[in-house]
Image (tube, grey):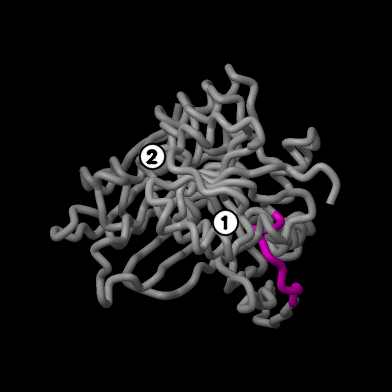
């Protein structure tokens, strides 16, 4: 590995431990040199096992470290914007967990700060880097299923039986709730497959009064020419993230479209095409680590190759739809995005 991008990690969150730090370790062009945590005595054992050289006692110390080139931010949702701006001021490239911020307005502020300081910013939507989605776009472009008229996308995990009250997903102050945690994926899938922005959103959600957060959400997104997406997410199911693309002459099913596994549990993915006569063709794609692919694309961009990096403005557009989703669900009305 020549000239790997040197990462610092803000916090020892579960997603960092189980997915992203191992992916950085496996990546061809990156390594973790430091982690900052407010409880270094707790994180030190994990850091040693992960091969991380230094455990620092404050986020500010990590941002000031000249040996750190890039920052990975896996903090609670409410902290993403603040620490992204702080990292930008420190001149670091930034990979921030989704969602980029708590609102589109806040996301715009973050993007402008990174532009002002001329630093790279990418939102950690790991699913985008899995080859199965490129294959889906190829099938759509071929015309095999005809014009796409509907998209259905769903993501859920069962974290309510029982509820872990320490889980940040149940803390409204920290940006908890299913919409920001998982709805960002299904909305992004719909926008990406239609390759345009929705005109309106009719959203509904189920609030858990014990925690004040939404635990199950669904919406109809209206796109141009009467095309629609039906999206849903939940803390009360365990469907693991699938989507379906419905065309005038057939459909495409992607049963493991968001979470195809981690580590030793990585599995092959399937793209299933059903034609207008019900004939079914199944394509198997080899197991890949989409987190590793994300890290490698980001590290390449830090070194100047931006070819695999989506424009950061897409993250702001996704947040606008999530904002509209929340407005619609809270007011029991249709939220317009037109204009």
Residue 217 image-quadrant placement: bottom left
Number of labels in the image equals: 2
Q: What residue is at 64 percent from the left and 30 percent from the top? A: 66
Give yes or no for residue 288 being in the magenta stretch. yes
For the residue labelled by badge 1, is the local secondary structure a helix, a strand or a loop?
A: strand
Q: Nearer the viewer, residue 43 or 244?
A: 43
**Residue 214: x percent and y percent?**
26, 56
In the displayed image of the protein, which residue is found farthest to the right?
2
Q: Which residue is label 1 attached to?
A: 149
Q: Which residues are magenta?
A: 284-293
Residue 313, picture quadrant? top right
Q: Residues under labels 2 and 1: Cα distance?
A: 38 Å
Q: Position of residue 180 (x, y in %)?
A: 39, 49
The answer to whether 274 appears left or right of 150 in the picture is right
Left or right of residue 179: residue 98: right
User: Pointer 1: residues within 10 angstroms few (<14), some, or many (20+)?
Assistant: some
Q: Could you say which disc has been placed on residue 79 in the image?
A: 2
| Element class at badge 2 | helix
* Sequence-first disc among 2 and 1: 2
């Amino acid at each position: 590995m020549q000239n790997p991008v040197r990462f610092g990690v803000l916090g020892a969150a579960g997603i960092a431990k189980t997915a992203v730090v191992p992916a950085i370790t496996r990546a061809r062009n990156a390594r973790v040199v430091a982690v900052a945590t407010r409880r270094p005595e707790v994180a030190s054992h994990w850091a040693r096992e992960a091969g991380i050289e230094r455990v620092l006692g404050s986020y500010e110390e990590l941002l000031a470290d000249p040996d750190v080139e890039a920052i990975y931010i896996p903090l609670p949702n409410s902290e993403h914007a603040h620490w992204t701006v702080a990292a930008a001021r420190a001149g670091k490239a930034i990979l921030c967990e989704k969602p980029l911020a708590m609102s589109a307005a806040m996301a715009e502020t973050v993007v402008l700060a990174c532009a002002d300081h001329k630093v790279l910013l990418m939102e950690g939507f790991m699913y985008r880097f899995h080859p199965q989605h490129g294959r889906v776009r190829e099938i759509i472009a071929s015309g095999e299923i005809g014009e796409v008229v509907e998209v259905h996308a769903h993501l859920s995990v069962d974290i309510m039986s029982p509820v872990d009250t320490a889980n940040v997903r149940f803390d409204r102050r920290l940006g908890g709730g299913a919409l920001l945690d998982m709805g960002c994926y299904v909305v992004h899938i719909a926008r990406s497959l239609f390759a345009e922005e929705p005109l309106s959103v009719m959203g509904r959600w189920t609030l858990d009064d014990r925690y004040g957060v939404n635990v199950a959400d669904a919406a109809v997104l209206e796109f141009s020419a009467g095309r629609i997406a039906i999206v849903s997410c939940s803390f009360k199911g365990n469907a693991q993230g699938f989507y379906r693309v419905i065309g005038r002459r057939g459909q495409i099913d992607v049963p493991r479209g968001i979470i195809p596994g981690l580590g030793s549990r990585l599995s092959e993915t399937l793209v299933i095409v059903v034609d207008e006569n019900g004939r079914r063709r199944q394509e198997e794609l080899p197991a890949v680590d989409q987190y590793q692919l994300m890290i490698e694309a980001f590290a390449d961009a830090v070194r100047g190759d931006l070819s695999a990096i989506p424009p950061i403005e897409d993250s702001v557009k996704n947040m606008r739809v999530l904002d509209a989703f929340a407005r619609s669900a809270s007011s029991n009305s249709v939220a317009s995005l037109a204009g």
